[in-house]
Amino acid sequence: MNTKDMVYKILPKVSKPTRYIGNEFNSVHKNAKDVDIRFAFCFPDIYEVGMSHLGLKILYHLLNSREDTWCERVFAPWTDMEDEMRKNNIPLYGMESFDAIKDFDFLGFTLQYEMSYTNILNMLDLAGIPKLQKDRSDGDPFVVMGGPCAYSAECLADFADYYMLGEGEEVMMEVMDAYAEWKKSGAPREEYLRAVAKIDGVYVPSFYNIEYNDDGTVAAINTIDETIPKTVRKRVVENLDTMFVPQEVIVPYMEVVHDRIMLEVFRGCIRGCRFCQAGMIYRPVREKSPETLLENAKNLLKSTGFEEISLSSLSTSDYRGLKELTDELIKITESECVNLSLPSLRLDSFSMDLMQKVQKVRKSSLTFAPEAGTQRMRDVINKGITEEDLMNASAMAFEGGYSSIKLYFMIGLPYEEDEDIVGIADLAKKVVDQYFKVDKDKRGKGLRVTTSVSSFVPKAFTPFQWTRQNTMDELKVKQMLLKDNITDRKIKYNYHEAPVSVLEGVFARGDRRLSKVLLKAVERGIRLDGWSEVFDYDKWISVFEECGIDPFFYTRERSFDEILPWDMIDVGVTKKFLINEAKKAEQAIVTPNCREKCAACGAACFKGGVCYE
């Protein structure tokens, strides 16, 4: 019985079997005999999450645009499917061919979230591929990694053959070209790694040796020889209008997290929020033209039949062509009865015009992100918005007929006091009060203000990469303090579990010594840690104890002169700039956004990068 028949035999025993059957509209099917390179794009989470990821959509179709390459999708199975696969000796397979991925040339993992790292090792185990890079031989696929977490994923360095850092549209094609040449040559496996190490944006961790001090901090980062670059700079696509963008994407059989067309309007961010890793690592800002986006939108509507278009960026309202683009999109969406979604809108640029566009076809809730409860804390994190901005935006929304608003905040931020926590409750109550100031005839019925609070996790390449992370007990105290101060029934309070955030912080700033913890965790059955019904904090702590590693060594405060585990990586933003921003945070001094005044962050070093003087 072939793999496909075996899979179909067990599907009646698992939940949501459409996660595993493939053959969706616009999926790409080729003859394996007609291609030289087989690439498994591995998303280390379940189907619904992975199929919502824009990077997968782009790189899947980009790789399949090559005649010599067939890219297939692979997702982490849910627990019931994994149990059945192991029971029936079904290997992890590509969704297009149902062939075992251990026979592919590449496994490419995207690193979107630190708590998915165990999923990667579990997927390698399900595939029958050696987890450690040093244990792989000529018959094994190359395991490569990319995505936002790749810049500081040193805890995965022992498992990756190499990382692709930065934007993948160009570097992906270059490493495939290098592979095609290497494959023809019949040279040893290491020769391919040496070849790609010369490509800008490729980091081969086995070519770097790490030395440690007695106190556990990094003493030195050395290359194995002089041919290997001391630092690896991320890749940046200069012109977004000319880069590859798929004109059709796969249409899932089942509902996924983001079940819609995603139009990426620009990359980078002008704002400089000090907690935000994406805002730093995706610099410099580069925009797509409205003309390019409109053409893409029309093509995707024709080729998919999706009922919603969403504009994707870190801060959509900062897109300079937003009015022109949305005016034209509304003409399309209204005629096609398609909804237009504008996420990532800032409070200080929310307008009646934007609100009316959002609700043209279908009205849903609005989401705002004040991030902190007091102005002092918003200045500490360089959020650049005021309470007045929130009140104005809320009033506008209620006058426009909205009755549901979501507010996002963080707790555990540097220099935070109890009054800042209480300030979150006060701000939510002021939004409720704003609703009742609006004429009854204008406002919608059934007010609901949802206050969602996450726990701050310091991330690499941000001004807070040196700061101490709050302990689990500290976070729990703050969560309960906020709960006690939210007394209005119209305010719904959600918060992210503290244990998950603490472990996220461990792996976000970890080093290679954590690899044995990850290995042991997977041996103990730990995986799918992003899902509360599976996550087991006590089991994690026992694994750390068994490995003789203190997890809280990685959540401590660090000095500015300490060598960081990721110091061999260059994202363009300089350490000098980050240190300066960290010092300004302590004094609650705001740095203007890039369009107001250049802060000399370093991102101008990329040729063609946009910098605002």
Image (cartoon, rainbow, N blue to C red):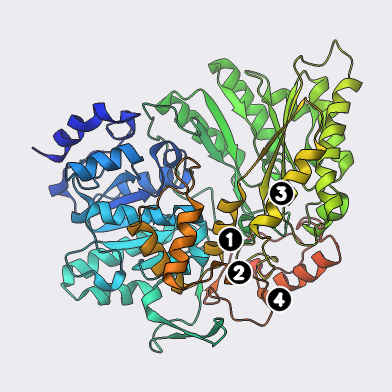
Amino acid of disc 4: Lys
Q: Name the residue under label 3.
A: 410
- State which mark lies toward you, 3 or 2: 3
- State which mark lies toward you, 4 or 1: 1
Number of residues whose C-alpha sits closer than 10 Å to that of mark 2, classed few (under 14), some (14–19) or many (20 or more): many
* Label 3 residue SS: strand
Residue 13 point in image, percent of width and height: 26, 29
- Marks 2 and 3: in contact by CB < 8 Å? no
Number of residues whose C-alpha sits closer than 10 Å to that of mark 4, classed few (under 14), some (14–19) or many (20 or more): some
Residue in the picture at 32% in, 44% down: 73
Count the marks. 4
Amino acid of disc 1: Gly
Q: Name the residue under label 4.
A: 576
Q: Is residue 96 something one can see in this rendering? A: no
- State which mark lies toward you, 1 or 2: 1
Q: Earlier in the sequence, mark 4 or mark 3?
A: 3
Q: Nearer the viewer, residue 94 or 58?
A: 94
Q: Name the residue under label 2.
A: 572
C-alpha separation, residue under disc 2 versus residue under disc 4 = 11 Å
Residue in the picture at 40% in, 35% down: 249
Residue 388 point in image, percent of width and height: 89, 39
Number of residues whose C-alpha sits closer than 10 Å to that of mark 3, classed few (under 14), some (14–19) or many (20 or more): many
Q: Name the residue under label 1.
A: 505
C-alpha separation, residue under disc 4 versus residue under disc 1 = 23 Å
C-alpha separation, residue under disc 4 versus residue under disc 3 = 26 Å
Number of residues whose C-alpha sits closer than 10 Å to that of mark 1, classed few (under 14), some (14–19) or many (20 or more): many
Residue in the picture at 82% in, 31% down: 487
